[in-house]
Image (cartoon, helix red, strand yellow):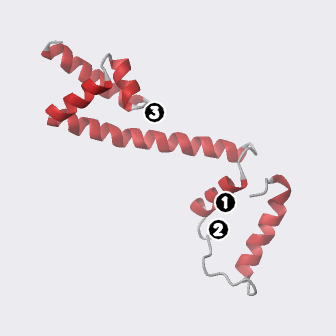
Amino acid sequence: MNDSERETVKVRFLEIYQSEPLTMAAAAQQAGADRATIWRWRQSDAAFERAVRKAQEHQDGLRVRAVEDSLFERLTTGKATGLELVFFLCNRAPDRWRHVKDAKPDARSDDEAYHLDRLARLDPILPRL
């Protein structure tokens, strides 16, 4: 592969890797290169390494959005587990749903009682944890 072809493959790899949630190996294959070749280029070309790292950050964002979308779909279609519901609520509404580490079994606050009541109303539709 000559230098011009190599640069074309590098650019194509970066375009593919930033376009959708993919592994680096899948993006390399679609660009017409082997994963090991991409690795060697990263080691020998600092500018390409920086571009790959930037693409990885973008890729992480794509993956997080894909997982968030999948979780939200499961939540809104009733397919989520109880753990997924609690995880979502504790992270998206921490002022109302939080993990209480120092709760005393005999002394429930009004806030805790409120949440227990809300969970009890959800219990018939949630699988047991």
Q: Nearer the viewer, residue 89 or 104?
A: 104
Write down the residue under mark 2. 97
Q: Quadrant of the N terminus?
A: top left
Q: Is residue 60 left or right of residue 119?
A: left
Q: Amino acid at mark 1?
A: Val
Residue 121 is tagged as none
Within the image, what quadrant is residue 14 found in? Answer: top left
Write down the residue under mark 1. 86
Q: Is residue 121 left or right of residue 107?
A: right
Q: Nearer the viewer, residue 44 or 9?
A: 44
Which comes before the other along the chain, label 2 or label 3? 3
Within the image, what quadrant is residue 78 found in? Answer: top right
Q: Is residue 87 left or right of residue 13?
A: right
Which comes before the other along the chain, label 1 or label 2? 1
Element class at badge 1: helix
The correct choice, above or below, for 39 with respect to 97 in the image is: above
Callout 3 crowding tier (Cα within 10 Å): few <14, some 14–19, many ≥20: some
Residue that protrudes farthest toward the front in the picture: 36
Within the image, what quadrant is residue 121 found in? Answer: bottom right
Q: Nearer the viewer, residue 33 or 11?
A: 33
Question: In whole angstroms, how far apart are the C-alphas of marks 3 and 1?
Answer: 27 Å
Q: Amino acid at mark 2?
A: Trp
